[in-house]
Amino acid sequence: MPKLKLEARSQPSQMWSYASPLLALACTVAIGVLLFALLGKDPVKGLQVFFWEPVKTGYAVGELVVKATPLLLIALGLAVSFRSNVWNIGAEGQYILGAIGASGVALMANPATGSWIVVPVLLAGVLAGLFWAGLTAFLRDRFNANEILVSLMLVYVAVQVLNFMVFGPWKDPHGYNFPQTKTFEVVTRIPRLFAGSRVSIGIIFALVGVVLVWVFFFRTRSGFAQQVGGLAPAASRYAGFSSRRALWTALLISGGLAGLAGALEVAGPIGQLTPYVPAGYGFAAIIVAYVGRLHPVGMVFSALLMSMFYIGGELAQSRLGLPKSLTGVFQGLLLFSLLACDMLVNYRLRWIALGVGK
Amino acid sequence: MMDSYALLIAATLNAGTVLAIASLGLLINEKAGIVNLGAEGMMLCAAIAGFAAVVHTGSDTMGFLAGIAAGAFMAAIFGGLVIWLNTNQYATGLALTLFGSGFSAFAGIAYVQAQIPERPNFALPYLSDIPLVGPALFRQHPLVYLTVAFALVLIWFLYRTRSGLILRSVGESPESAHALGYAVRWIRMGAVVMGGALCGLAGAYLSIIYTPLWVEGMVAGKGWIALALTTFATWRPARVLLGAYLFGGVTMLQFHLQGVGVELPSQVLSMLPYLATIFVLALISRNPRWIRINIPAAMGKPFHPGS
C-alpha cells in the first residue's frame, strides 16, 4: 500500500504561489457545481450567472468594475496591514465611518454649491476612516490591546453610529420616516467616467493606489521596513526599524483607504446614507487581499473575481431563485480552498511505498 | 422594583451562559496553543443547525447535539488545516468565520419564520419559590448550572490531573512535549474539536433557549467577545466564568436601562457590550508583563515536529 506523504520543500515554490489561487478557484467552482446540483438547479446555468453574465456586455463589465472598486481599495490597505503582521480585520467599520464622514459633508451642499464639493466629501471619508483605524492603533500602541479584537468590535460600534445618524439627527424629514438621509445634491455625486455606465473616477483612485502600493512595497525603504517587521520582528528591531511606526502606518493606510472606499460608495452608486451601506466589502476585501497574494497587481484580479461573486449572487437570486447569501458561502469557500492549496507552496506530495525508506 | 433586579440577575446568568460556554471552549484551545478566530462562524452554523434540528424533531436534545456536531465538525476542518498543513491560524480562523456567516445565512433562509415548540418552564421545585433568590437563580435552563459545574471540572482537569498538565505543556512548549513523546498534534486536535463542540453548544443554546428563533447574524459578535474573554481572564477558567457573567450583565443592562427610563439613544445602549469589551481589553492588556506571564507561551505559533 503506497502512502501519501507531505514533504517540506527546501524553498517555497514560486510556481505554486501563483498556481494555488487558480487551483483554489477550481476547487470552489467544483464545490459550487456540486451545490447547484444538490439544490436541484442546472449547474451550467449556475456557472453562467457567476462567470459569464457579469462579463457579457459592456454595461455588465462596468457593474463588475463598480463593485470591484471598493474591494480593491480596501484590499490594498489590508495588504499593507497584513504584510506588516498587523491584523486589521475591522475594515468594514472604517468603511462605514468613511461613508458617514462623507455624508456629513455631502449633506451640507445645496444646489448652488460648486462641484469642488466632491473633494471635501472624499477627504472627509478618508479622515473618518483614518480616525476609526487610529483608535485601534492607539489602543494597541498605548494599551497593548489586541488589534484583531478591537478593530472588529469597532465594526459593531460603527454600525450603531450609522444607525444613530440615520434614525436620529440626519433622518430625511420628508422621507416618510424611513431611516435614511435625504438624497445628496447632484453636485456631490462622484464624477463618472463614461456615459451609460456607473463606473466613476473611483477606479482611477484604485489603480493609482495599486501603483503607489507597489512602489511602497518594492521600491521604498519604509515599505521594506514595514514588511521586515512583519516577517522577522527580531531582525527588524536589530535593524532599528520602529514597530510602533509600522503599526500606525499599517492601520492609517488601511483605514484611510477603507474610508475613501466608503465615501466613494455613499456619494457614488448609493447617493444617500442608509442602514444598508455596510455590504460586507470590508470582510470580502480580506479574501481579496489573500487571494491576490497581498500583491497589488494580484489583487486587481482577485477584486474582479470577488465582484463577480457579488453580482453572481444577485443574479442567482433573480434568475434561479437562490438566496443572495450564496455569495458569502462561495467567498468563504474560496478562502478556505486557498489556504489549503497554499500547502503546495511549502510542501510537495509524495507517494511512498510502505516498507521502503524510513 | 426588587423583582426587576431579580429578573435582571436571571437574564444576566442566561446571557452570560452563552458567553461562558463558548469562552471556556476557546480557553481549552488556547491552553493547547491554538487560537481559533472562527468562533463566531462556528456559533452561527451551530445556531442554525440546532434550531433546524429542533424544528424538525421537536427535541431540544437533538438540537443541542446538532449544534455540538456542527461546531466540532467545523473545528475539525480548522484543526486539520492549521495543525497538519500549518496554515496561518488567524487567516484560517477568519476563513471559518466568513464561511460560517455566509453559510448560516444561506442555510437559514428556510427557517427565518419557523417556530419551535413552546419552551418548557425550568423552575426548580421549592427553590424557585424563595422570594427574590428563586426568580433570580432557580428558574434557569439546566445548562446554566451545568456550565458552572463544567468550569469547576475544567479547573480540576487543567490543574489537578496529568492529562491537564500535558494539555498545558502542549500550549507552553510543544517542543518539550514532543520530545517527551506526546503526540502534540493529536492533543491539539482534540483540544480544537472540544473547543468547537463547546462553541457549537453555545450557538445552539442561543437559538434554542436564549432567543428561541433564527435571525441571520444572530450571534452578533458574541463569538468575538468570547475570544476577548480569555484574554480578560488571563487564561484562567474561574475568571472566564466571572467575565462571562459580567458581560452578560452588560448585555442585559442596555434593556434594563431602557426599562428604568434612562434617556440614551437605543443605538448608544446597543454599543455598550462592544465598548465594554474594548475598554476591558485595554485595561487588562495595559501591562504587557502581566499578559506575558499568563499567556500560553506557544499560543498562535505553529508546531512542526522535526523529522
Image (cartoon, coloured by chain):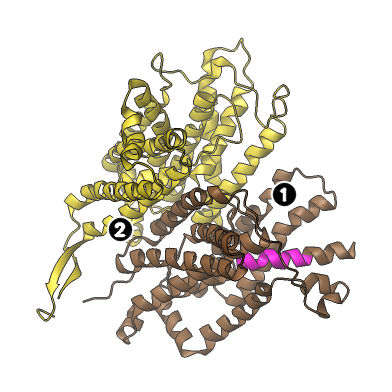
The residue range painted magenta reads: B9-20
Looking at the picture, which amino acid does disc 1 mark?
Answer: Leu
SS for callout 2 = helix
Which residue is drawn at the image coordinates 63% and 57% (left, top)?
Answer: B279
Question: Residue B232's spot in the image, x, y percent?
Answer: 59, 66
**Amino acid type, callout 2:** Ala
Quick one: quadrant of the C terminus of chain A? Answer: bottom left
Q: Which corner quadrant of the image does residue B181 belong to?
A: bottom left
Density class for disc 2 (Cα within 10 Å; few <14, some 14-19, many ≥20) is some
Q: Nearer the viewer, residue B120 or A215?
A: B120
What chain is the yellow one? Answer: A
- Residues marked 2 and 1, same chain: no
Chain hosting mark 2? A
In three-dimensional space, the C-alpha distance between marks 2 and 1, rounded to whole angstroms, equals 41 Å
The residue that mark 1 highlights is B269
Residue displayed at 60% across by 78% down = B151
**Counting other residues with Cα less than 10 Å from the Cα at mark 1, is it few (<14), some (14-19), or many (20 or more)?**
some
Disc number placed over residue A329 in the picture, else none: none
Q: Which residue is mark 2?
A: A340
